[in-house]
Amino acid sequence: MNPVRMLWCRAYQTCFRLAIPLLPYREPKPLGSFEETAELLHEKGIRRVLLVTDATIMQLGLPRPLIRELSARGIEASVFDEVVPNPTIANVEAARERYLAYGCEAIIAFGGGSAMDCAKAAGARIARPRKPVKRMRGILKVLAPLPLLIAVPTTAGTGSETTLAAVITDGETHYKYPINDFALIPRYAVLDYRTTLGLPPHITATTGMDALVHAVEAYIGRSTTRDTRANAIQAVHEIHTYLLRAYRDGSDAEAREHMLHAAYRAGLAFTKSYVGYVHAVAHSLGGQYGIAHGLANAVLLPYVLEEYGASCEHRLANLARRAGVVPGAMNDHDASTAFIQWVREMNAAMRIPTKLAGIRDEDISEMARHADAEGNPLYPVPKLMDARELERLYHLVQERGERDAADAAAQTRDAHATPSATAAPRAGLTRGLRRIVRAARRRVGRIAHRAHRTIRH
């Protein structure tokens, strides 16, 4: 990344970190059961709700107990079960139309990250009917209160029940639109581990590793707080202790409960501290090929941590020691290396591959540009990378023959050895930095002011 852009990214991230105490973050209020959820809606006088889920969850009958509790209190649930694994703009619009057609007054997102994202974006479109999803991409582009949103996670990993984020795919271009707004944070989260009992092992594995990525990227980033670090440490500790147990025995109630709470804590951590290039690259792979987000995250994590190298070694080592992954006396280099090895061993134990099939060379530069646009300047990563540098990550996880891999590695080395034509000269950098800092301060100040003015309710 050229020096001027690097300075802009770091100035933007610094100003945003300083603004964190001024921004209206809130935590969803936990609810412990479907009965409590139905009673809450009854007390609020709500008579019709939109239940957003997918066809598989409906076929498994997971929402039936909740629907029964709602019906017993005179509340009608209109079920929208057309959510796809990477929810599309068309998905969002169909859910919105169902909400309006049935006169609903609240939204219940029932499922994993896809159902949550679809429900959040549908709520945003209901709140801002004249603003299409494409124009909501980025930070604080909704800025209007959503209908009452309740999240019921059925997987322990996405953390979407806590977050201000939704990711929606353009079905025509395959581009993913990350939407980040305080209005998207659910008002309530139903943390009932019974919804995760019997979850298939491969879903348990990939969603559990998704939670791990959330906690790790939140902890090693440059915008942490005492609370986000504590939540990340606790999440990694619980994942280290309970994920393999939940994977090997889907009916292990203790493991399921701890994993659900680990995902919740990891979600709280990255909502404030953000994620990193693991997510940016995974989103582009999901948009281009439909690769499941948790799977892409799990495969990418060890490679990205190694690419960060010394820039994240101390923080990663601290996380490893404090979460109990490595002995407390281990030095930084050995602890960070051991943590990455533990991630690889977890993937292997849960039959998660080391590479991703189907990545085409001709798609890599375009996906890297999308990852660059998503991650920079927003994500406070340990080591900044531009699109050209991010291309290496796609080659590292690309499943190919040995000869192809050697050629790709050589090409990547050659590319990195060539000085960037866009690199700015050193002269004038101080003056440019001042302008960058002033611009970043103004931008973050406007964001904080607008957020308080419109979301304070």
Image: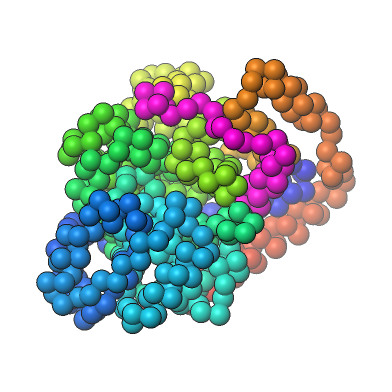
| Image coords of residue 354 (percent x, y) | 51, 26
Asked if residue 349 lies in the magenta stretch, the reply is yes
Q: Residue at x 65, y 67 (%)?
A: 442
| Image coords of residue 276 (percent x, y) | 55, 44
How are the colours assigned in the image? rainbow
Q: Residue at x 39, y 80 (%)?
A: 100
Q: Residue at x 33, y 27 (%)?
A: 324
Relative placement, left or right, of 126 versus 66 is: right
Q: Main secondary structure of the magenta part?
A: helix
The answer to whether residue 226 of the structure is visible from this angle is: no
| Image coords of residue 217 (percent x, y) | 49, 41
395 and 67: which is toward the camera:
67
Q: Quadrant of residue 80?
A: bottom left
Relative placement, left or right, of 128 versus 8 is: left
Task: Work out which quarter of the rendered image holds the N terminus and state it.
Answer: top right
Relative placement, left or right, of 268 versus 252 is: right
369 and 21: which is toward the camera:
369
Relative placement, left or right, of 402 versus 104 is: right
Q: Eyeballing the image, is 155 above or below 179?
A: above
Where does the magenta region start and end? 346-374
| Image coords of residue 176 (percent x, y) | 57, 55
Task: Work out which quarter of the rendered image holds the C terminus and state it.
Answer: bottom left
